[in-house]
Amino acid sequence: MGYTAKFRVWRGTDEDGALNDYDVDVNEGEVVLDVIHRLQATQAPDLAVRWNCKAGKCGSCSAEINGRPRLLCMTRMNTFDQSETVTVTPLRAFPVIRDLVTNVSFNYQKAREVPSFTPPPDLKAGDYRMQQIDVERSQEFRKCIECFLCQDTCHVIRDHEENKPVFAGPRFFIRIAELDMHPLDTLERKHSAQEDYGLGYCNITKCCTEVCPEGIHITDNAIIPMKERVVDAKYDPAFGLFRVLRARSKSTKTMNEQADRAWSLLCSVEAGDVDYASVRSDVEDAMRQAKGVASTGTVLASLEALDHFEAGRLDEAAAEAQASLSWHRSAQERSDAWVTLARVYDAQERPTATVEAIENARRHWPDNPRLRHFGGDERRP
Amino acid sequence: MTQTDHSGPLAAGTGAPGRAHITLRTLRTDRWWVQPAITAGVLFSFVIYATWRAFENAYYYATPYLSPFYSPCVAENCAPGSDDLGRLVGDWYPLSPALLILVFPLGFRMTCYYYRKAYYRSFWLSPPACAVAEPHRTYTGETRAPLILQNSHRWFFYAGLVFNVILTWDALLGFRNSDGDWGHMGLGTVVLLTNATLLWLYSLSCHSCRNTFGGRLKHFSKHPIRYRTWTFVSRLNTRHPLFAWLSLFGVALTDFYIRLLATGTISDPTFF
Ligand code: SF4
Ligand code: SF4
Ligand code: FES
Ligand code: FES
């Protein structure tokens, strides 16, 4: 059933403008955009309005209806009382071009400022493997049609033009969240969310969520989780400590494993089971990995000493063994360093020093299996 | 055709140069002020009631029930029997025991993401409702002190968990009769249990909780158990505002019920 509706439409430019009253016919099942088009066709041929899909999918027809940011094509006329005056204005957070058309380039500027998806550099396109649950959160944000209604309604910039340079707005917070929650994205986005994009300006009053035509839970699923991630990264000493300790214990584990691997290879060289050349690359690899995660250069000194010795670098071997002695407090490590020194002195044909070193080694750890190398007789190497 | 009046000052913000020249603060025609007005009214009443009760320093213990405003009771001047954690604070402390502990639940609710929305809108009018201009000339949100301290929410969340355990224990103590014998139950027990349940629902649906249990992960499929927990907490999280209100009423009504018992206005109906 058709009726005649009262419409007030803002007409004007950035210079000046006003609300204009119109009486216009409405048919059953129509949306506000249909009525605006009828106005164009009948009474206001020069009325400017931006639209495209008429299906709520292109995000072009954003405007404000009775003061609320909405899509013209998705606002049904039957949601209004027939006697009600329907007021239509352009978006009020952005500069107006003419009538209902605004300049939303602020949003394109902000879009360019957010770095795009950055997968690990060595990952090839065909190697992306992930499960649905890994991308579910990000997918909600991909529903965005870029209507910018959320940006328009956000009081941080709607009511405070001066915040525009420092605030990216809800549409870009979901973009940042989308990427930060993506399992393959490698960029640090938590500090920048707060320091570069103004996440802290949002006071989670949820107007963006209220107006989003795609029903994206902007505040609950993007902004608040990002705020929590910022706290993880910046304000939570316990979590920070936990992370450091966990990373430490992980790397300590790697270091110990690799150092043990290198050590046992070198011990079998020492025992004469294999020759150095055949294990050399394995030893080097293990030592490189161990050193990569070692917290200081000295924790691996006794290992390095033995490696130098087996490689024939006697002076370096002696220096590392001495370093190990001055550094390590454990009796076993000291004993091992003394055994290595004994071998160096032996090779240098310094019998007194050799015997002394063996005695020291035995004193620290009488059962050191490496002492067998000296035939169990400390006086006769 | 009518022209809008341009003589008045432009509305805050939306009057910035280049924007459509509209002087009205909002063109909303619905009763947008109802929601913030109700929120402000209810929160204000709660604050008045809680302040009065915290300072009253009386009628908070009706054996075996302890009011949530006074639990744990750790001051020297706690009512006999109400100090199940011990009187940890020396007798130099002369004021109401409630004031010693109130900062924790208060801080928890003040920094809660939902309550922030509620009071920023209803008390600070920032904004009072969507697309209604706020009255402030400048705005920096939560970027600097004091509001940057809202980032401490998770600490209060952790403390809140401790309080939940204590209040649950209080509810279990309610299975005694006034002589301290176990195996009894009265209406007060039900009241305390309901209160504890609502507080647990409120805490478990918290956004910091959601982040802790899995929200901070990037790769859910590598952490199947945390993913399931996160899914569960997320489901509760969608009802966080509801639990926020219910638990607020829960605490106030529980306290009120115990006050009625303690003043002898009514007596606790016992089931067994
Ligand atoms: S929740 Fe934050 S981003 Fe969304 S409208 Fe409110 S202040 Fe703006
Ligand atoms: S998040 Fe929603 S309101 Fe914002 S631009 Fe995207 S679709 Fe529009
Ligand atoms: S015309 Fe495409 S969203 Fe309205
Ligand atoms: S208690 Fe409300 S968000 Fe944490």
Image (cartoon, coloured by chain):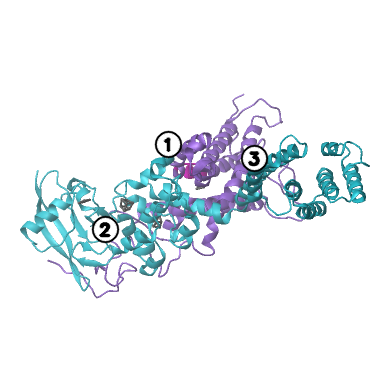
- Residue under label 3, please give it: B166
Where on the picture, by quarter, is residue B160?
A: top right
Considering depth in this image, is A337 or A311 the residue closer to the camera?
A311
Does residue A117 show up magenta in the picture? no
Q: What element carries label 2?
A: loop
The amino acid type, in three-letter code, at marker 3 is Ile
**Whole-percent x, y for residue B9 in the image:** 30, 74
Considering depth in this image, is B78 or A315 the residue closer to the camera?
A315
- Residue under label 2, please give it: A67
User: In percent of the image, x 58 and y 43: which residue is there?
Assistant: B255
Q: Quadrant of the C terminus of chain A?
A: top right
**CA separation, marks 2 and 1?**
43 Å
**What chain does badge 3 belong to?**
B
The amino acid type, in three-letter code, at marker 2 is Gly
Query: Which is more foreground, mark 2 or mark 1?
Result: 1
**Whole-percent x, y for residue B272 in the image:** 62, 24
The amino acid type, in three-letter code, at marker 1 is Gln
**CA separation, marks 3 and 1?**
41 Å
Label 3 close to label 2 by CB (< 8 Å):
no
Q: In which quarter of the image is the N terminus of chain A?
A: top left
Where on the picture, by quarter, is residue B11?
A: bottom left
Q: Which region is colored magenta?
A: B242-248
**Whole-percent x, y for residue A227 in the image:** 48, 53
How would you classify the magenta stretch by its main secondary structure?
helix
Considering depth in this image, is A272 or B29 the residue closer to the camera?
A272
Q: Is mark 3 on a helix, strand or loop?
A: helix
- Residue under label 1, please give it: A131
Question: For this view, does A72 lie left or right of residue A352?
Answer: left
For the colour purple, the matching chain is B
For the colour cyan, the matching chain is A
Question: For this view, does A7 lie left or right of residue A218?
Answer: left
